[in-house]
């Protein structure tokens, strides 16, 4: 009895383990990615595709392109051959775009796992320009802020004063008016004018006489004063000498 029970228990355990293994999700690795070309980059000829493609259950990776926007999953076109070496970061492959018409295209990398499932990168849009020139980025124009210019200097008006020219005045020559001597009437006695020169001479004489008199008077007083002074000195000496 014990042996059949052990067999049943063993079978149940195996069934549980199998169910757990089947129910466990597949190991998720890093998502593949394309880093070059840049989004919306203009390309032509042979284009290098750079990125990463790795997975714990890695089997291979593949490159695809399609017109953008991608109409359906069946529109993706395989590029070249499959790659069986993982690429952590570097050149994934090349794309010969020289024969394609100009326009927008999408690129992607697909990592295929060992169980047959796969994981795609996000599509990278590029612009194929085989026939038209590639436009270089236009540098941003920085507008300079206008500086406040100083107001224009107005010219200073210079006032020139012209000298006033005075016209010479005509010299006025006094005209001598002839004096009419009235004719004396008969019996009229006209006074005779006393010459002014005789009165002036009398005044001068009186002045000179007064000056002379004053000079003599002063000299007399000086002489009298000197006499009395000498007399006083002699009297003083006499009193001194007398025994």
Image: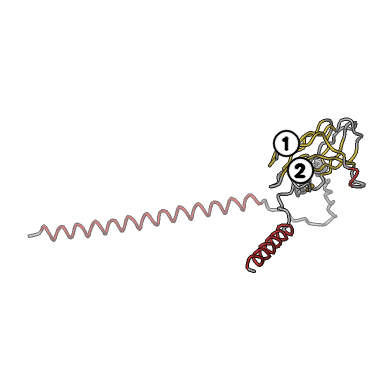
Q: Report the front residue among 85 and 223.
A: 85
Q: Identify whether 8 is placed above or below 104.
A: below
Specify the farthest residue to the left: 243
Residue 113 image point, x, y percent:
75, 46
Q: Report the front residue among 177 and 172.
A: 172
Give the residue displayed 89% in from the left and 44% down from the top: 68
Residue 121 image point, x, y percent:
78, 47
Q: Report the front residue among 13 and 215.
A: 13
| SS assignment at label 1 | strand
Can I make out residue 124 in this image? yes
Q: Where does label 1 land, which residue? A: 91
Label 1 neighbour load within 10 Å: few <14, some 14-19, many 20+: some
Q: Report the front residue among 123 and 87.
A: 87
Image quarter of the N terminus = bottom right
Residue 85 image point, x, y percent:
71, 37
Task: Choose the circle earlier in sequence order: 1 or 2.
Answer: 2
Disc number placed over residue 211 in the picture, else none: none
Q: Where does label 2 land, which residue? A: 34
Q: Identify whether 143 is placed above or below 240.
A: above
| SS assignment at label 2 | strand
Q: Could you tell whether 215 is left or right of 208 in the image?
A: left
Specify the farthest residue to the front: 1
Q: CA distance from mark 1 to mark 2?
A: 10 Å
Q: Could you tell whether 124 is left or right of 236 in the image?
A: right
Can I make out residue 153 in this image? no
Badges 1 and 2: C-beta atoms under 8 Å apart? no
Image quarter of the C terminus = bottom left
Q: Identify whether 126 is placed above or below 243.
A: above
Residue 95 image point, x, y percent:
82, 34
Label 2 neighbour load within 10 Å: few <14, some 14-19, many 20+: many
């Amino acid at each position: 009895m014990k042996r059949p029970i052990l067999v049943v228990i063993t079978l149940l355990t195996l069934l549980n383990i199998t169910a757990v293994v089947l129910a466990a999700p597949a190991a998720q690795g890093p998502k593949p990615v394309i880093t070059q070309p840049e989004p919306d980059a203009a390309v032509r000829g042979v284009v290098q595709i750079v990125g990463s493609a790795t997975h714990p259950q890695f089997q291979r990776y593949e490159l695809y392109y399609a017109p953008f926007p991608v109409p359906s999953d069946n529109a993706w076109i395989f590029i070249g051959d499959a790659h069986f070496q993982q690429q952590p970061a570097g050149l994934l492959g090349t794309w010969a775009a020289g024969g394609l018409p100009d326009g927008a295209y999408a690129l992607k990398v697909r990592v295929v796992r060992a169980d047959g499932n796969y994981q795609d990168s996000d599509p990278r849009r590029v612009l194929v320009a085989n026939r038209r020139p590639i436009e270089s980025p236009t540098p941003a124009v920085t507008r300079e802020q206008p500086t406040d210019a100083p107001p224009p200097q107005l010219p200073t008006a210079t006032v020139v004063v012209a000298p006033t020219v005075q016209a010479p005045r005509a010299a006025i020559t006094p005209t001598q008016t002839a004096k009419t001597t009235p004719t004396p009437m008969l019996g009229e006695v006209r006074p005779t004018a006393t010459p002014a020169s005789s009165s002036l001479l009398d005044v001068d004489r009186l002045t000179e006489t007064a000056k002379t008199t004053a000079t003599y008077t002063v000299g007399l007083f000086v002489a009298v004063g000197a006499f009395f002074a000498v007399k006083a000195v002699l009297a003083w000496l006499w009193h001194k000498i007398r025994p």
